Amino acid sequence: MEQQRAYRRTPARRRNSILRLEWVRLLLFYILPFVVINLIIFFLVTTKPSYEVTIANTNDYRTTDVTFTITSFMPLRNVTITLDGEPLDLTPVGRRSYQSTVTRNGVLEIHMENFNHMAITGYEVIDVLDNELPDVTSYTLTDGQLTLWLSDTQSGIDYENLSAVTGDGREIAPLSVDKNAGTAVFEIDTTGLTVTIRDMSGNEYQPAFSLTEIIEEADNDAIHPAE
């Protein structure tokens, strides 16, 4: 009797096994490949490019190095990098890494486009360089000579290119320059004097001095920074 019952259950078990095999086969050879292929297609269609930008510290406030690294692995159709709208010259420095030395502050604009037309645009601010004007901290007039005390806390005064123009348009050079003391001496002119002071980053300051105003200040026993 038990053998007859076992015999009757055998075809049902066989049918269940066949159904399970069919489901496994359907899952492995149809459903999973369909899902995987569609995921790959979705990834390829929607993946955007990516990058890293490193702006190095500066030692002289005149230059800094900008390193651009492509971190995405998809092929690129186009990459443009500009500083305030001007193309940036890049030199390869490694695998998918490029570097440029910049000499002024500004805004980097990075535009990247993948082969799938997905694109990104990013911005990085460069603000580590010297963009402050040099200064005249004080001045004195002695025997027709104007002595200026100069200051620049970042890139430093460009003492080699100090100059002045008189009120009637004559260009004159300083009588003397003392880099250690931070002073420059000019012969004052009755028509006035406009001094051109630059720092090593090219920032320019042009204070004007009037002989009449200097004498009035001296009479009041007051020495003031140039306006």
Image: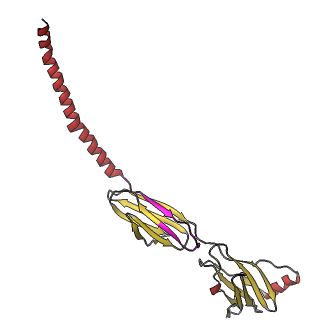
187 or 190, nearer to the observer: 187
Residue 74 percent across, percent down from the top left: 33, 57
Q: Is 212 above or below relative to 96?
A: below
Q: Is residue 80 left or right of residue 165?
A: left
Residue 184: image location, x then y, percent: 72, 86
Residue ranking furthest to the right? 220
Colour scheme used in the picture?
A: secondary structure
Task: Please report the bounds of the magenta region as a residue range.
Answer: 47-66
Between 59 and 43, the one lying in front of the other is 59
Task: In the rendered view, tell whether residue 31 sits above or below residue 99.
Answer: above
What is the quadrant of residue 113 in the picture?
bottom left
Based on the picture, tell me whether residue 53 belongs to the magenta stretch.
yes
User: On the rendered structure, is 113 left or right of 204?
Assistant: left
220 shown above or below 115: below
Instruction: List x then y, in percent, for residue 108.
Output: 49, 66
- Asked if residue 68 lies in the magenta stretch, the reply is no
Per the picture, the main secondary structure of the magenta-coloured stretch is loop
Left or right side of 160 for 83 = left
Residue 216: give x, y in percent of width and height.
85, 84
The residue most toward the front is 180
Looking at the picture, tell me which residue is in the foreground, 51 or 3.
3
Figure quadrant of residue 193: bottom right
For the C terminus, give its image quadrant. Answer: bottom right
Q: Quadrant of the N terminus?
A: top left
Judge by depth and name the residue closer to the eye, 59 or 119. Answer: 59
Rendered position, 118 above or below 179: above
Image point (51%, 62%), residue name: 124
